[in-house]
Image (cartoon, rainbow, N blue to C red):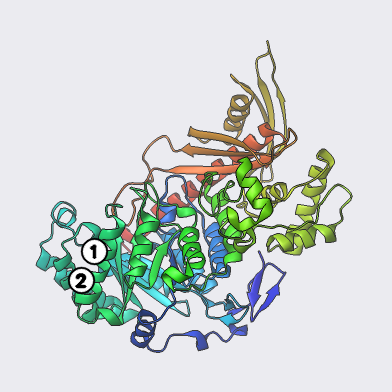
Amino acid sequence: MSSTTNGVESTTGERPAVEEVDVTQFAIQDMREYARAIAHGGTVLVFDTTLRDGEQSPGATLNTQEKLDIAEQLARLGVDIIEAGFPAASPGDLDAVRQVAETVGRTPRQGPDGEIVAPPTIAGLARANKNDIDKAWEAVQGAVRPRIHTFLATSDIHMEHKLRMSRNNVLEAVGDMVQYARSLCQDVEFSPEDAGRSDPEFLVKVLEVAIQAGATTLNIPDTVGYTTPEEYGGLITHLRENVPGGKDVIFSLHCHNDLGLATANTLAGLQAGARQIEVTINGIGERAGNTSLEETVMAIHVRKPVFALETNIVSTEIHRTSDMVSRYTGMVIQPNKAIVGANAFAHEAGIHQDGMLKHKRTYEIMDASTIGLNQSRLVLGKHSGRNALRTKLEQMGFHVNPEELKEIFRRFKDLADKKKTVTDADLEALVGDEIYQPVETWELVKMQVQCGSGLTPSAVMTLRNNRTGDTVTDTSLGVGPVDAVYKAIDRIVGVENNLVEYLVQAVTESTDANGDVTVRIETPDSRGFKETAQGRPRRRLFSGRGVDTDIIVASAKAYLQALNKMLATQEADSSTVAIAADAVTPA
C-alpha cells in the first residue's frame, strides 16, 4: 500500500523512516486544555475500535499485517483515535498494537481539506489492573499521541456476579488504576463497563473519582445494547450536568446493536453533549455489532442543521475502507446495509427511477461520490493499457504501488479476455482480491475438477508451500465439485477443521460475472481459545474470500485463505506457549 508524508504520496509501498518526519510538533502538550476545547467545541472525535471490538466478531481474526493495513486506511480515512487492540491478551496482540503505534501513530496525514494534520491517537485497552495497564503502555508509547483506555464494570449485576466487588471496592480500584495509568500516559480514557444498566447516581461517583485521578475522556458504554435513544441521551445529559468537572472532559459514546439501536443511541448521545463516538467499520463487533462509523458520520454530514457538528473524516475514503475491512475479516456486507450496502444507491421501483431521472434528490439524500463510490465514465476492455488501468484505479480511490499495479494489470488482462467489458464492480473485486491478501503458506498452482450428471465429482489439486518451496498434488472424490476440491486441499494441507459457512455471490449481473466466495472454518476443539477483554470466550473461526469467474476456483481460493489464517494463528499460539514456558522456567 502507498503512504503519505507531508502531503506527498509515496508509491514505493514503504513508510518513510520516522527520523525523516518531524512528528513531535503534533504531540498534545496539555491534555486537560485539549479535552476542555473539544468538550466545548463543535467537532466530534471519531474513535475507531474495528481492530479491537470489531475483531471480536466470530471469524474476524486479523493477523499483524492485516491490522497494519487497516490502521493505515483508517488514518487515511481521518479517524482521530485508533483502538488498535487489547495488548494484555497475548504477545501477538501486544506486538500488533506496538507496530501500529510506531508506524501509523507516527506518520502525519492529509486532513479533509488536504491540510497536513497529526497522526491518529493510538489507544490500547486495559482492564483496571497494573499488568494490563503496563502492557497497554508498552504497546502504545511509541505513538506521538498514545492513549491508555482502562475500564471496570459498574452495574450491580457485573459487580456481584463477575467482579465479586462492592461499590466501595470499585471506587477504590477506579481511583488507583486511573491514577496509575495517568502516571504513565497523559491521555487516559476510563469506561464504566455496562454503564447502560448501572445506577446513574453511582456512575456520578465513579466518574468523579476517574476525573480526579486524571482521566480526560469518560466513555459511557451501553455494553449489551440495552438502552433506547431517549434513555441513553438522558443518561449522558445527567452525567454531564452532575459529575463534578464533567463539562470540561470529553464524554464518549460506545453502543452495541443488540436491539438495532446503536447508531440512534450514539446520535442521541451527541445531541446530549458528548463529543467522541466509538465506532467500527461496517458496524462489526460482538453479537449484533457496534455503532457503524459510516452511518453515524454520514448522519452528522447529511443532517448538519440538526446536529450542528462536524468530524475530521475524509468521507470519500469510506467505501474503500468498508471494502477492505469486509475482505480482511471475511464478513460480507448485507446488500441493504445503510451507506455502504450494494443497494444503498440502487433504485428499481419505476416511480423511484422516474423521480431520479427528473431530479436525483427526489430519492437520494447524498451523492454516491461523497463516500468514494466511483461514477467515472472511463470504460475498460481488453484493449485498455496499463496507464488507463492506473488512471481508473486512481479515480476509484485505490492506493497501489508499481508492483501491485503490475500484478493487477496481469489479472485485469486475463479477466478482459473473458469479458467484453470490465465493470467497476469487477475491478473492485479483482483489486481487493489482489492487494487485500495476507502472505500465504499454501498457494493454489492449478486445479482440475470433473463433475456432471451421472459422474462422481473429483478434483486434482496442485498447491505450492511457500515456506518450503515444495509443490504437492493430490486428488479426492466428493459429493459435489466444491466438496471434492476441499477434501483434496485437506489431504495436502493436513489441518483439521470444520466448515461452518459457505457463501457465493455474483459480483455483477451477467452470466460471465466474477464469483465472490466467502467461507468460514472453525477449529474442531477449544485449544488455544482466547478471551475477550470482558472475559468472554471467543470461538476460533477463520474466514476467507476468493474471486474468480470460475466459482469453483474462487471457492478454492477462499478455503485456502481461511486455512492459511488458521495455520498462522496456530503458529502464533505455539510461540506464545513457548514464551510463557520460558518465562516460568528457572534460570
Q: Is residue 414 above or below residue 386?
A: above
* Badge 1: residue crowd in 10 Å (few <14, some 14–19, many ≥20): many
State the image quarter where residue 139 is shown: bottom left
User: Can residue 135 be seen at all in this image of the molecule?
Assistant: no
Would you say the residues marked 2 and 1 are in contact, meaning their CB atoms lie under 8 Å apart? yes
Q: Is residue 281 left or right of residue 270?
A: right
The C terminus: image quadrant: bottom left
Judging from the image, what secondary structure is the residue with disc 2 in?
Answer: helix
The N terminus: image quadrant: bottom right
Residue 174 is tagged as: 2
Rendered location of residue 543, percent (x, y): 52, 43
Nearest the eye: 148 or 369: 369
Q: Residue at x 35, y 79 (%)?
A: 39
Rendered location of residue 391, percent (x, y): 79, 62
Residue 137 is tagged as: none
Residue 152 is tagged as: 1
Nearest the eye: 3 or 227: 227
User: Can residue 500 be seen at all in this image of the molecule?
Assistant: yes
Q: Is residue 331 above or below residue 503?
A: below
Rendered location of residue 550, percent (x, y): 71, 34
Rendered location of residue 501, percent (x, y): 50, 34
Separation of marks 2 and 1 at Cα, in angstroms = 7 Å
Between disc 2 and disc 1, whose residue precedes?
1
Residue type, numbered disc 2: Val
Q: Residue at x 68, y 67 (%)?
A: 13
